[in-house]
Image: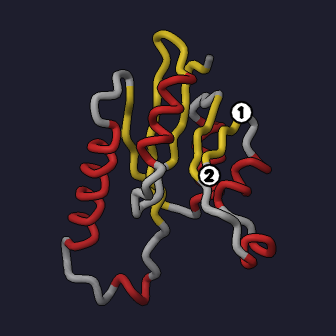
Amino acid sequence: MYKHILVPIAPDHNPQTGEAMEIAQSLLADGGKITAITVIEPIPGYVATYIPEGMAEQQREDMVAQLKADLGGVKNADAHLVTGHPGTVIVDYSNEHGIDCIVIASHKPELQDFFLGSTAARVVRHARCAVHVIR
């Protein structure tokens, strides 16, 4: 059983989100904690100038609200929205916050994943803790 589990949730909240939360709860030790994060890529400067004022902040607030809704009635759970490259941010977050297991959903690999690597594959390769991948 794990004391602190990280559940990365894609911004589109794919159908595996509920399954990931159920698995995280089943792997959680008594008194443990689940942290759900959504990672969004930074908006390039040349695009940011065309976004109406306040829209980006409103979108972030909406994403945090959806992330908290994904947690439902899970006890001892936090939700965070982080900006950066998903594969890197998930690994860095796990290292900096004492995560001992990551429960991450993955899609069926496509051709470009073999050249570039999916987020889940990057997390599996670089995480210092256990990683549970859901397909």
Residue 127, horizontal then vertical, whole percent: 73, 43
Q: Nearer the viewer, mark 2 or mark 1?
A: 2
- Badge number at residue 64: none
Q: What residue type is disc 1 on? A: Ala
Looking at the rendered structure, the kind of residue marked 2 is Arg
Q: Check the image and name the residue furthest to the top.
A: 30
Is the C-beta separation of discs 2 and 1 under 8 Å? no
Q: Which residue is mark 2?
A: 135
Residue 61's image quarter?
bottom left
Secondary structure beneath disc 2? loop
Q: Nearer the viewer, residue 70 or 129?
A: 70
Is 105 situated left or right of 65 in this image? right
Label tally: 2
- CA gap between label 2 and label 1 equals 16 Å
Colour mapping: secondary structure
When the figure is inspected, residue 86 is found, relative to residue 99, above or below; the finding is below
Q: Position of residue 84 (x, y in %)?
A: 53, 62
Residue position for label 1 = 130
Q: Is 93 above or below relative to 76? A: below
**Residue lying at 72% horizontally and 78% vertically, measured from the top left:** 112
Which residue is depicted at the point 48% across and 50% down? Answer: 16
Label 2 packing within 10 angstroms: few (<14), some (14-19), many (20+): few
Residue 132 at what x, y percent from top left? 66, 38
Q: To which quarter of the image does residue 56 belong? A: bottom left
